[in-house]
Structure formats: C-alpha cells, structure tokens
Image: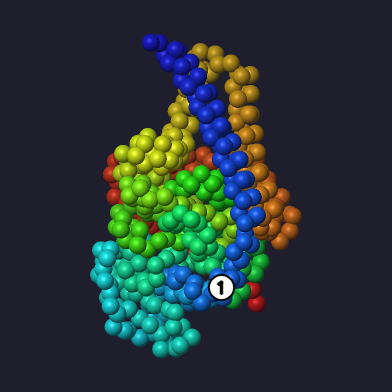
Amino acid sequence: MTLESIVKSSELFFGWYSLFYILVYIILAVSSFLEIKKYYINKYFLHKDVIIKSNNALGVSIIAPAFNEGFTIISNVKSLLSQEYPRFEVIIVNDGSTDDTLEKLISEFSLVKVDFFYIEKIITQPVKGHYRSTNPIYNKLLVVDKENGKSKADASNAGINSSKYSLFICTDVDCILRRDTTAMLVKPFIESEKKVIAAGAALRISNSCTFKEGMLYESHYPDNFFARFQELEYIRSFVFGRMAWSKLNGLLLVSGGLGIFDKDTVIEVGGYWHKSLGEDLELVTRMRKLMHEKKIDFEIKYIPESLCWTEVPSDGEVFLRQRVRWARGLIQTLFLHRKLFFNPKYKNTGLIVFPYYVFCEFVVPILEVVGLIFIFLDLFFFGINIPFLVIISVAVYCFYILITLISIFLDQMIHKQYSNLKEVAKLIVMVFIEPFIYHPINIYASLKGYLHFFLQKEKKWGVMSRKGFKTAN
C-alpha cells in the first residue's frame, strides 16, 4: 500500500467522520431545544415557592471543600447560608489549609469544637474535628477540619460522611449560588416518577460580574482574554450540550461546581474517587453503572437556569493546567470503565453515551491533528483538490458557528444575562475567532493531558490564584 493511497483513504475517512460528527450535533441541537421547551412549559406546575414554604421539604446538605480560601471564605460562606429553603445545612470542609481559613471561620462565626458522631462510610484522610457556632443565627453551619487529602474528592467525601440529609449539593466554596438554588435542584427529585440520582444546573462565569450581599447584582461579559472564551464555552456546554443529554437521559457529567446527588447511591458506589482527576465525571459513571446493574429505572436531570457563578482561570498557565487535568481525567475515566463500551448490559450508557465520549470527546483532538498532517502531506506531495478542501472547511466552520450562535440565542432568550447589547455583540464577535485562537489551545491541552496519562506522569493539581468577587457599594 503506497503512501499516496494511505493519505487518500485517510482523507475519505475524515470526510465521513466529519459528516458523522455533524449529524450527532444536529441530533443534540434538536434534543436540547425540545428539553428546554419542555422545562419552561412545565416550570410552574410545581412552583419553587411551594417547595420553599413546605413543612415536608426534602433535607439537603450543601458541601463545600475549602483549601487556603482565607481571602474570600467569609463572604462565600455567608452566601451559602443565605439559601431560601426550609431544611438545609452548610458543611464547609477545611481540607488542611495552611493559611488562616479555619481561624477566620472560627472568629467570624463564633465556632467551637463539638462532640460529633462521625461515621466514616467513605474512607478519607483523618478528620481532626467538627465545629458549630454558638450564635443561633448560624445554626445551619458545620465546619469539618481534616488533614489535607490532596484532592477535592477526599474533602467532599468527609463532608458526605458528616452530612445528615438524604440529598447533598456539592459545590466549590468560591461559588455564588442563587438563593433559590436548593429549591430548584430539589424539584426533579419530587417531580420524577423514576429514581433521580443526580441533577445539575447551568454555571456562569463570575469574572467581571458584580455581587451584593451574596447575590448577583450586575452581570457583565468578562474583560479577560481567557475568561471571554470560557464564557462562550460554558454557554454552549450547559445550554446546548447538557440539556440535550438530559433529554436523552444520558448525562455522564454533573459539574463539580454545582450538582445535587442522592447520598445513599453515592455512598453505595464508594463516594468520590480521590485518585481521579475528573472526579465528577467518574462518580456519575459509577452511579449510572450501579443503576443498570441493579436494573433500577433512573434519571439524571439538568436545569437550564443559571443557579451558580464561579470564577474561572484568567491566567494562561493556570488555564492550561486546568484543561490538561480535565483531559487526563477524561481518558482516565474512559479507560477505568472501558467495559461499558458498546456493552448492551448498560443500555444507553454503554451503547450511546460512553461511545459518544470516546468518539466525540476523547478521539476528536487526536483526529484533528492527524487530519491536518495528512492534509499537508497531500498538499505538498500529491496535489490535493484545493477547491473541495475549501468547501468542506467552510462548511464545517459555518456549522460550528451556527451551533454556537444558536446556543447564544437560547441563552439570551432564557436568561437575558448581560446588561446591554454591546456585551452580547462582543460575545458574538468571539464566536467567529474562537476556532482559530481558543480551540487550538484546548487541543494542545487535551493532547498534553493524554500524554501525561500514558506516561503516568505524577499528577499535580496546582493552585488557582483567585481575585475574588467584585462587590457593589
């Protein structure tokens, strides 16, 4: 077989693969639109105010790990405590902080160490103590002090062990939650006839936004280079991708920034895996696997509303480190649960969802680079059909733009997120340049993450430097 025939055959393969990829995203686009439409038609059948005022509301534990968060810990905890919900607790897990995080918590909330009946249902690093407030205003607050586990997973597991309610929300201590977040996340557990094991909602980027008394005061499009592209990425991912998979009951990822889970199911699968670099993806995979093995009809739901604001990396080095970790977490999870792949025992998880993550998430960065290599080989040595190449490239680019613009349109129609049209215009401009600037950076990060996995390079979480939230006077 000659090099020319290999190149030509490869180009034919990439052409068919591109058509397959486009078809998949058309299906996801239609599914997303139908699910969003269904959500807003049914939104007021069970109004959140009914849940908020109910005497029989499901109890919810809000768990937020904290490591060296002294800069913002007080305002963030107060934000979590401001939830409008009748039965909840806030559990802050101090994961061996080396700064003044614990000292600030003790001082601000009048905390004292208490005797606590702690059952280690999920094994974690040793817990040194539990703290409660002597001030009745903060009676919903519990602080868990533990030795550092070198991962959010270990801290989250300690929070799960310490929680008293059957549902728990896992979030980050730097996140700002809408005050009705708990009520909104609980709704799927009440409304569904199936067993709901988890639910999530859209996250928004807090960079450049203004907050007042723990709530969003004014929303702005980020002014930072990396944050701008991430805003676009979040809109496409949460409004478009997650809602489509919610419609198909195929969610394999509930974001670590905001997700609610059935505690018994999480404990049964062993909690978060502390060695995972994508603990949120890996946990949901195990939960789905368990439900299929027990032959339980289940659901994982997503809510197309912005319930959480989180700070994203604004520094190139930190951003790359995060994306390398995400890519490594993806391949780690796919490899660990490879027996799901096209396994009919696991129904849609094995036959649709898992193959999608293999063919449309994991493989794509590799194919993009390999495809470019073959195009250049054909261009320089075998005389590629340039007009045909241009037509295909423009078609793929336009489809990519169309999908993103539809995501923005749906987002603005639902949320009306920005304070003026000028910011929406800036967002739309970024759509057209994203494939040439931001996308290649992500491809590089993904390939680097894959390489680290195969070389078994020591994992390093690194520290994300935070600038904190802008507050209104």
Amino acid at the residue labelled 1: Ile
Mark 1, residues whose alpha carbon is within 10 Å: few (<14), some, or many (≥20)?
A: some
Closest to the observer, 67 or 119: 119
Against 54, residue 432 (above or below) is above
Query: Which quadrant holds residue 149?
Result: bottom left
Residue at the image position 30 percent from the left and 58 percent from the top: 268
Query: In the image, is 411 to the left or to the right of 446?
Result: right
- Residue 469 visible, this angle: no
Q: Residue at x 40, y 75 (%)?
A: 101
In the picture shown, does residue 221 fall above or below 378? Answer: below
Residue 71 at x, y = what percent? 47, 73
Q: Quadrant of the N terminus?
A: top left
According to the picture, the residue beneath numbered tag 1 turns out to be 52
- Identified at 59% across, 64% down, the residue is 46
Secondary structure under the numbered disc 1 in the rendered image: helix
| Residue 345, horizontal then vertical, whole percent | 34, 39
Furthest-front residue in this view = 193
